[in-house]
């Protein structure tokens, strides 16, 4: 399937499985009359595959070492991308950042790295399923920067177009999205 056909098919899957109308309160605390819940798309076999393929295509030339982000939205994306990057012969390892470090065991904030491995000096992209203001992704950015990573990009599957571009711009971070909310709000 061509990139444009894959993008069109994924758009339909997101529209059908993950986009809705009706009043909701967003993670940012804002009220909205539409929402995206990408979990049904990220956990659907075809949706997960298309997300991973399109994300890989968007990132393959960025010379990344790791992809990850804040739990829960980044976990399925990072895992699927790690798998497809291996299949395509250009592996990009995955991790995720806990919203709050575990209070038992190793008490880690960043999960997925083997013992003795760090993000220090690594080129990292922060990925997110849906971005509104960018606050959740910035929590992940701060955690991985504290670990010594070089965050080179924030990539979201759907940008709600409600302030994230300004948030990341102020932090000196490039920001890209696969889709914009306005694409789903047409018609």
Image (spheres, rainbow, N blue to C red):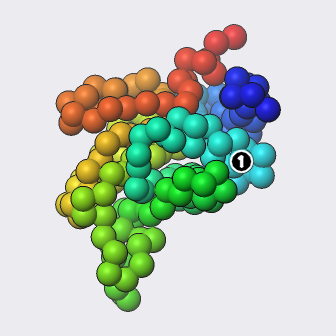
Quadrant housing residue 108: bottom left
The reply, left or right, for residue 20 in relation to residue 174 is: right
Looking at the image, is 67 positioned above or below residue 30? below
Percent x, y of residue 113: 41, 73
| Neighbour tally class for label 1: few under 14, some 14-19, many 20 plus, Cα within 10 Å | many
Residue at point 31%, 42% (across, down): 152
| Residue 136 seen in render | no
Which residue reaches farthest top? 187
- Specify the quadrant that holds the N terminus: top right
Looking at the image, is 101 positioned above or below residue 31? below
Q: Which residue is mark 1?
A: 49
Percent x, y of residue 48: 69, 49
Residue placed most toward the observer, 185 or 96 = 96
The reply, left or right, for residue 69 in relation to residue 11 is: left
Residue placed most toward the observer, 44 or 112 = 112
| Residue 19 seen in render | yes
Residue at point 62%, 37% (across, down): 54
Looking at the image, is 72 positioned above or below residue 152? below
**So how many labels did they put on this image?**
1
- Specify the quadrant that holds the C terminus: top right
Which residue reaches farthest front? 89
Residue at point 45%, 46% (across, down): 127
Residue at point 28%, 26% (across, down): 166
Percent x, y of residue 78: 53, 55
Residue placed most toward the observer, 102 or 165 = 165
Percent x, y of residue 10: 71, 33
The reply, left or right, for residue 133 in relation to residue 1 is: left
Residue placed most toward the observer, 179 or 25 = 179
In what element is the residue under mark 1?
A: helix
């Amino acid at each position: 399937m061509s990139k444009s056909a894959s993008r069109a098919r994924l758009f339909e899957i997101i529209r059908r499985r993950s986009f809705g109308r009706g009043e909701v309160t967003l993670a940012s605390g804002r009220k909205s009359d539409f929402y995206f819940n990408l979990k049904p798309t990220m956990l659907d076999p075809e949706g997960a595959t298309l997300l991973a393929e399109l994300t890989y295509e968007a990132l393959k030339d960025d010379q990344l070492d790791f992809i990850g982000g804040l739990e829960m939205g980044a976990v399925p994306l990072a895992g699927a991308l790690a798998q497809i990057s291996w299949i395509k012969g250009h592996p990009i390892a995955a991790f995720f950042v806990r919203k709050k470090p575990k209070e038992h065991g190793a008490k880690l904030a960043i999960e997925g790295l083997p013992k003795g491995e760090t993000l220090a000096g690594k080129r990292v992209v922060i990925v997110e399923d849906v971005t509104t203001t960018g606050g959740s992704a910035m929590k992940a950015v701060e955690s991985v920067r504290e670990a010594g990573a070089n965050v080179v990009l924030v990539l979201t599957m759907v940008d709600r177009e409600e302030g994230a571009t300004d948030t990341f711009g102020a932090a000196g971070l490039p920001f890209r999205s696969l889709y914009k909310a306005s694409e789903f709000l047409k018609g």
